[in-house]
Amino acid sequence: MRAVLHSERARLTVLYGSLLLLAGGGLIALINILLRNGLYTRISGAVMTTTIVPAIKGSPPPTVPGYKLPVPAEKLDTGATPTPEQLEQWRATRNLTSAVEQATLHELLIVSLLALAVFAVLSIWLAWWMAGRVLRPVGVITETARRLSAANLHERIGLRAPPGELKRLADTFDGMLDRMEDMVGAQRRFAANAAHELRTPLAVQRAAAEIGLAGEPSPQKVARIRSKLIEVADSSQHLVESLLLLAVSEEGLEATEPVDLADLAEAELAGLQGTVPQDLLVVRDLEPLTVAGDRTLLGHLVRNLLANAVRHNRAGGRLEVATSREGVLTVSNTGPVIEPGDVPRLLEPFRRRAERQHTAGEGAGLGLSIVASIARAHGAELTARANPAPGGGLMVRVWFPAEPPVARPAEETPGA
């Protein structure tokens, strides 16, 4: 009972009921005031017109307090003086008028109070019903939110109601559930893929140690196994570092500073000189572009885009890097023809165009997902588009906002 009294429905009931009672009480008060001001005149006029006026023809108008002649004075013959009987009749008529007025007003007051009491009960019931109707969608949203868990994120409110604030609230809640379901699904896929990616090199290391080094292997075999173990360890270390970088970029920015993306792209291209094939044509169109952000994360963004464009290129292919004053960084390459429907999947962690072969130099499938995460941290918009045949490949564009991103507050060190 206490919860009901402190509920929003009770508050709305009090509000609606008070407004209805105020309106009803105001209407009754207005009627009583208007009738009280004019009732005496109307009653006295009606009574005296029928009883007094015929008797005073030829007599002057009597002086009776509160009495107004029902006919114009010029129509009366004022040459005669009223008799005592006439004056007594006027007094009796005046008393009768006052009694009728008092009785009428008293009856009107009683009826008004009874009507107001009935109206109060109906107002409270109507207000309670109206509040329940208005808050019914909120109850549906509350019950749906209470039932939700990781096992039934597919449930939706699906409120069927005319357009309005509560309809928009329910649709917004459904949209939030869509995003939550996508995020939970992505986290599950990420965890499963990360476990798979880490399990494979560990299995290779274990097999190399148990099988390759079993018995008394020759020095040449030991050298091959050692090289293989180092290669697998390097791949695992790269994967772990990529996962850490992805986690850091998802947390947002601690601080921002002006960064010239054109100079950063030039420096990253120079760092890739040893890995770029001789027959790969590199085209630069680097206009000055300064953005606010984290220099280290932006360096990883440019480096991953360039490394991805080089790794997935073809012989005699082309790599284009461009920055514009409008705040756009563009990296495009030639390569295998990609279906347009497969492009969004490439931005998810551990997604590749082809199955992983676990060969040397093969990426972990985190490059573009790291780029997308860093772009989000900087408030930038990333789009990817498959280049048509015969050139193929992928074009990635990153639009940086004119306003600098909001840096997250630095965590305080305990005891500082």
Image (cartoon, rainbow, N blue to C red):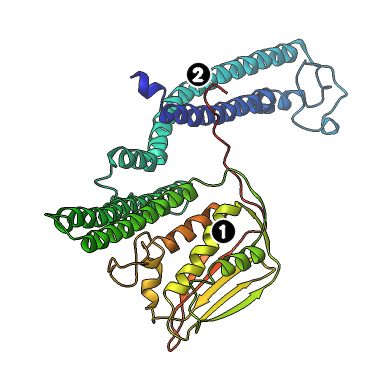
- The image shows residue 160 at horizontal and vertical percentages of 36, 53
**Image quarter of the N terminus:** top left
**Residue beneath disc 1:** 299
Which residue extends farthest bottom? 390
**Residue beneath disc 2:** 110
Mark 2: secondary structure: helix
What label sits on residue 228 in the rendered view?
none
Q: What whole-number distance in Å separates the C-alpha atoms at marks 2 and 1?
A: 86 Å
Which badge, 2 or 1, is on the more N-terminal residue?
A: 2
- The image shows residue 224 at horizontal and vertical percentages of 26, 63
Q: Is residue 122 above or below residue 225?
A: above
Which residue extends farthest front? 219
Viewer can see residue 325: yes
- The image shows residue 312 at horizontal and vertical percentages of 41, 75
In the picture provided, is 323 more to the left or to the right than 415? Answer: right
Hey, which quadrant is residue 189 in on the image?
bottom left
Total residue callouts: 2
In the picture provided, is 290 more to the left or to the right than 226? Answer: right
